[in-house]
Amino acid sequence: MTEEFEQVALVHLDALYHVALRLTRNRAEAEDVVQETCLRAFRSFDRFNPGTNCRAWLFTILRNVFLNRVRTRGREVLEAEAGGLDQVEMTADTHVGGSPEEQLLQTVLHGDVDRALAALPLVFREAVMLVDIERLSYREVAEVIGCPIGTVMSRLSRGRALLRRALVRFAREHGYVKEAE
Amino acid sequence: MTCAEVRARLHAYVDGELSASDIAELDGHCVECQECAARVAAEHELRQLLRRQPRDAAPPELRARILHRVRREAAVATARRWLPVPALAAAAIVAALLLAARTPPPLIADLVDKHIAYAELERPGELVTSDPREVADWFRSRAGMRVTVPDYSPAGIHLTGARLAEAHERRAAYLLYEKGRTLLSVFMVPALAREADLPGRRVAYRDHEYVAYEHKGYRTISWSDGQTVYGLVSMLDYQALLECADRLRAERAQQTQL
């Protein structure tokens, strides 16, 4: 079983670490979360359904390990950050395609994306990260987060809008003319 | 398709989550409407930007550490199978748990989702108290429910509150406990006739049988007394959960006799 686990699950170690890093925003914590996730996954690996997405299964465990740890430290996680933002309606003004602001996106630096993602409230950050960076389907993300697909979609569109706004602000700070390094 | 309809489907479109007919309609609209075409292009651009981000690889030491731990656990599990008789009871529990079915029944999966949803909240209880009697009174006056509120404090597991929850379209009593700050959820759900006997692999513990599932990284222990389905959900280990289950069962029996 160890060998199979290494071949099927541990090949996703980089992805797990990457997601953990985005969740915790701290390397030491990310390592702890990933290690605990892998051990938990190993112990219940016989219950993993081989036909399904192993990465999504691992992310589900990782997210729960993360939430549990954050609680353990007496820090609040999702509530205040979300603060009913799921209910916020998307409005037409979240972006206007083709405006000069859109062109600003092209001057964005890698560090800016990290900074903008890190500043995103957790509920939006995880939705954007799982879809845009980890390339999970809406259904898989709904399974990982444990919410309806509609909630994934609203968090995603809200998250992307907030991200875009932050990126545009950073690009302005760079003075627009600054080219990507 | 109108502009509003395009806007509503914008993200699903760039994420490849639309049906072929919706894609064709949306594409058709964008040929005519420059504004919508620009919106689509802008979403694509943001998505590409995110996908181009460099990714951190897991540090080699982390990989080595995990491999070492996993292999060591596997070795211990193999050794355990050959333990002499006295340790067999404990080993049998472990073995039975390892063989637990892959997918929990919907009710148990629902309880795990409830646990996760409330674990995300700072104060998940509607009633916040560490007094078992206050909780029992609250359920009685609030919902006419006769709820047993077990005392786990000798094991360092403390009552923090209670709430009413929906579980599978049934009103359930939900007790919240914490050990350190690891949550333990105790659910009591009115049993349907067919739930007198829960499906799943059974684990015997102190002369009673329980059903164990591990789901989404959480462990669950459940059983039914014909009238109520009891479900415990936590990241605590099975030994602790079984002990809590046994305690609840004993207190419930005592209360019913009174």
Image: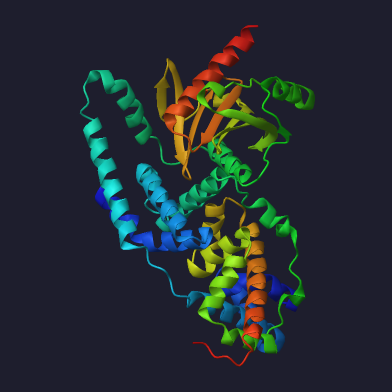
Q: Residue at x 61, y 93 (%)?
A: A177
Which quadrant of the figure has residue B24? bottom right
Query: Along the line of sight, which residue is nearer the eye, A154 or B23?
Result: A154
Is residue B71 positioned above or below A140 on the image? above
Q: Which residue is at a point 38% across and 67% down the rendered structure image?
A: B57
Q: How many marks?
A: 0
Q: Residue at x 71, y 78 (%)?
A: A95
Q: Is residue B142 left or right of residue A176?
A: right
Is residue A152 shown left or right of residue A35? right
Pick the front one: B240 or A171: A171
| Camera sees residue B135 | yes
Question: Of all residues shown, which one is farthest toward the bottom?
Answer: A177
Question: Residue B233, position in %: x, y?
Answer: 53, 35
At which x and y percent is residue B254? 59, 10
- Residue B140, quarter of picture: top right
Vertical relation: A86 (above or below) B222:
below
Applied colour scheme: rainbow
Residue A53 location, x and y as percent? 42, 57
Q: Nearer the viewer, residue B198 or B48?
A: B48
**Residue occupying the far right of the picture:** B141
Residue A1 visible in the picture: no
Give percent across and percent down for residue B187: 60, 30
Q: Residue at x 25, y 46 (%)?
A: B71
